[in-house]
Image (cartoon, rainbow, N blue to C red):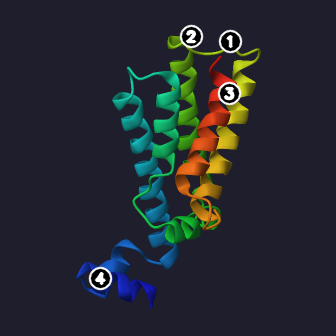
């Protein structure tokens, strides 16, 4: 049924849709791949666009990029919940690790603006997982009376308190 609706929406024959996506899980997996890549692309674009910005401004832009996906919050949540069922956990981990690696390269370059961390590897590990959890909570579970801007502002403040003196 789902594949039929997708084929109709795409304007293609159902047989063609089944040729590329034998099961609905393959469609979900392809969507996960697309959203994951878009998130990384947003992150990298924010890095480039904010290269000369202050570290707090850059951190805010990066957090905003992590929460700017090309799909609705509802679809994003459903895709996130299907990561393991579609065997895409390694892909999500690799993309997340690549973004953390970019930060581990950036921070020493911005040492004049950043706090000396006693254990940079451990600090980045904790920040990676805290930001990952908080951005998903902001996207999926945020109460209606708490704006996206307020949540992202609080997350940016938390990260800045760790990284900026």
Residue of label 2:
111
The first of marks 1 and 2 along the sequence is 2
Which residue is at the front of the view, 142 or 131?
Answer: 142
Residue 124 drawn at (x, y percent): 67, 28
Marks 3/1: CA–CA distance = 12 Å
- Quarter the C terminus occupies: top right
Could you say whether the residue bearing mark 4 is in a helix, strand or loop? helix
Q: Are marks 3 and 1 in contact (CB under 8 Å)?
A: no
The first of marks 2 and 3 along the sequence is 2
Could you say whether the residue bearing mark 1 is in a helix, strand or loop? loop
Identify whether 164 is placed above or below 25.
Answer: above
The first of marks 3 and 1 along the sequence is 1
Which residue is at the front of the view, 35 or 87?
Answer: 35
- Quarter the N terminus occupies: bottom left
Residue of label 4:
9
Q: Are marks 2 and 4 in contact (CB under 8 Å)?
A: no
User: Is there any visible trace of residue 25 in the rendered image?
Assistant: yes
2 or 3: mark nearer the eye: 3
4 or 1: mark nearer the eye: 1
Give neighbour class at mark 4: few <14, some 14-19, many 20+ (Cα, 10 Å).
few
Marks 2/3: CA–CA distance = 15 Å
For image coordinates 58% across by 32% down, the residue present is 100
Which residue is at the front of the view, 38 or 54?
Answer: 54
Could you say whether the residue bearing mark 3 is in a helix, strand or loop? helix
Residue of label 1:
116
Residue of label 3:
161
User: Is there any visible trace of residue 90 in the rendered image?
Assistant: no
Residue 108 drawn at (x, y percent): 56, 13
Could you say whether the residue bearing mark 2 is in a helix, strand or loop? loop
Pick out the residue farthest to the front.
Answer: 145
For image coordinates 57% across by 46% down, the residue present is 152
């Amino acid at each position: 049924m789902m594949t039929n609706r997708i084929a109709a929406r795409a304007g293609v024959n159902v047989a063609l849709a089944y040729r590329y996506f034998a099961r609905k899980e393959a469609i979900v997996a392809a969507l996960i791949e697309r959203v994951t890549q878009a998130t990384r692309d947003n992150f990298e674009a924010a890095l480039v666009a904010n290269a000369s910005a202050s570290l707090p401004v850059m951190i805010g832009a990066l957090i905003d990029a992590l929460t700017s996906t090309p799909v609705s919050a509802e679809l994003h949540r459903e895709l996130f919940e299907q990561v393991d069922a579609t065997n895409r956990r390694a892909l999500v981990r690799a993309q997340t690790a690549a973004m953390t690696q970019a930060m581990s390269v950036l921070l020493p370059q911005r040492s004049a603006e950043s706090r000396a961390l006693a254990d940079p590897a451990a600090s980045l590990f904790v920040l990676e997982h805290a930001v990952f959890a908080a951005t998903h909570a902001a996207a999926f579970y945020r109460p209606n009376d708490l704006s996206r801007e307020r949540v992202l502002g609080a997350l940016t403040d938390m990260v800045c308190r760790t990284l900026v003196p």
